[in-house]
Image (tube, helix red, strand yellow):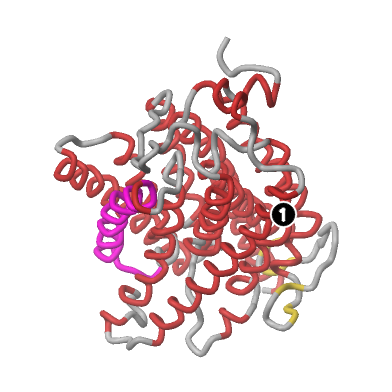
Amino acid sequence: MEDLTLAVSEFTLSIDTIWILVAAVLVMFMQPGFALVEAGFTRSKNTANILMKNLMDFAIGSLIFWILGYTLMYGEDVGGFMGKISLFFSSNEIHGVPDKASLMFQTVFAATAATIVSGAVAERTKFSAYIIFSIVITAVIYPISGHWIWGGGWLSNLNTPFHDFAGSTVVHSVGAWVGLAGAVMIGPRIGKYTKDGKARAIPGQNLALGALGVFILWFGWFGFNPGSQLAATGSENASAIAHIFITTNLAAAAGAVTAMCVTWIKYKRPGLSITLNGALAGLVAITAGCDVVSPGGAAIIGILAGTLLVFGVEFIDKVLRIDDPVGAISVHGLNGAMGTIMVGFLSTSNGLFYGGGAAQLGSQLIGVLSVAAWAIGLGFILFFSLKKSIGVRVSKRIEEEGLDIYEHGESAYN
C-alpha cells in the first residue's frame, strides 16, 4: 500500500511539473509575439533594434532573475515588503513542484514585464540605456511589487487578500506603468506632434507582422493563465484549467469584436491595428480574475477592455500627448488595472455583484493604486537617472535615419 501511495505521489509530481514547464514554454513563445507586434506597428528602419531589445529582455531577464530577482520575489518574507535575498538560486527542494520548475515558470513572467516597456519607448531610445533599464526592472522593480502579491507580502495579507491570479497588475500593469514613465521622460518621436500640439499618425511598416504577433500572444496566453494554476493532476485542477482556458479565450474574443465595433462606429471604418490591440486588451484584463469570474463575466471584461482600449489610446495620444507607438500603456496599463478592479465586482466567490460585499473591491483598488505608484515612481527615478548620466535618447540624425544602422551596424532588411 505504501508503494502504491508513493507511486501515485511520484506520478502527480511528474505531471504537475511537466504541465508547469510546458506552460512556461508557451509563455516564452509570447516573446516573439511581442517582438512581431512591436516590429509591425513601428517603422522598418528600427526593426533590428526592436528585435534586439526583445531578445535581450529575455536573455538578460533570465540571468538577472536567476541571480537576484527570484529570491527577492519569493524568498522568506522581510517585513511584508520583499523576499530575503539569496544570490544565484539553486534550490533542489520540492514545494508542490521542484523549485527549479518554479524558477523557470516565473522567469518567463519577469521577461514579459520587461518587454512591455520596449513598445512604449520604441524608435527613439538608446540601446545602452534600455539594457540598464531591463536589468533594473527584472532585478528590483518587478520582483518587489510581485512579492507583495505572490510572495507572501503585505497585499496578500490584507483582511481580504488582493487577488491577481496570473498578473494583470503584477506583470502587465507594472511593465506599462514603467513604460509610461519612460515615454514621458524620453519624449515623443520627431514628427509625432505638430507645433500646435496635434497628434500625427506614424504608420507601422507591416500589419501582417503585427497580426501574426497577436495570434502568437493569444496562443501563448493559454500558458500564461492556465499555467498559473501551478498543478494539473486531479479533477479540481483539471476543471480549473478548463475554466481558465474558456474565460481567457472569451475575454480576448470579446475585446477584439468590441474594439472593431467601437472603431467602426467612431471612425466609420473597422481598423485592423486597434482591433488587434483589442484582443490583447481583453487578454490582459482577464488575467487577474480568469479563475474566479464566470464565462459571462469574462465576456463582460472583454467588452469593457475593447472599449477602454479605443478611448484610452486616443486620450493618451491626443490629450496627454504621450507617444506610445504600440499602445502598450492602454493595452497593459489601463486594462491591467481595469481587469484587476473588475475582480471586486465579478468574482463569483466574493464579488460585489455576487453578494460578496465591497471588501474584495477595496483590496483590489488598494493593490492597483499601490503597484501603480511603485512602478511609476521607480520608473521616473530610473529614467531620470539614465537621462542625467548616459542619456536615454538617440540624436536627431539617428532617429530620423533609423536606429538599426547607427545602434547595431546592420539592418533587418537588405
- Stretch of the chain drawn in magenta: 291-317
Q: Residue at the location (70% across, 69% down)? A: 74
With 235 as the anchor, is 76 left or right in this view? right
Q: Residue at the location (32% across, 48% down)? A: 314
Identify the image quadrant of residue 297.
bottom left
Residue 164 place in picture, x, y as percent: 49, 69
Magenta: main secondary structure: helix
Residue 85 place in picture, x, y as percent: 81, 68
Q: Is residue 178 found inside the magenta-colored segment of the image?
A: no
With 214 as the anchor, is 34 left or right in this view? right
Residue 257 place in picture, x, y as percent: 23, 46
Q: Is residue 302 found inside the magenta-colored segment of the image?
A: yes
User: In the structure shown, which secondary structural element does the residue marked by tag 1 occupy?
Assistant: helix
Please tell me which residue lies in front, 179 or 342: 179
Q: Residues within 10 Å of mark 1 (few under 14, many from 20)?
A: few
Point out the image quarter for the N terminus. bottom right
**Residue on which the image places disc 1:** 385
The amino acid type found where label 1 is placed reads Ser
Q: Residue furthest front?
A: 195
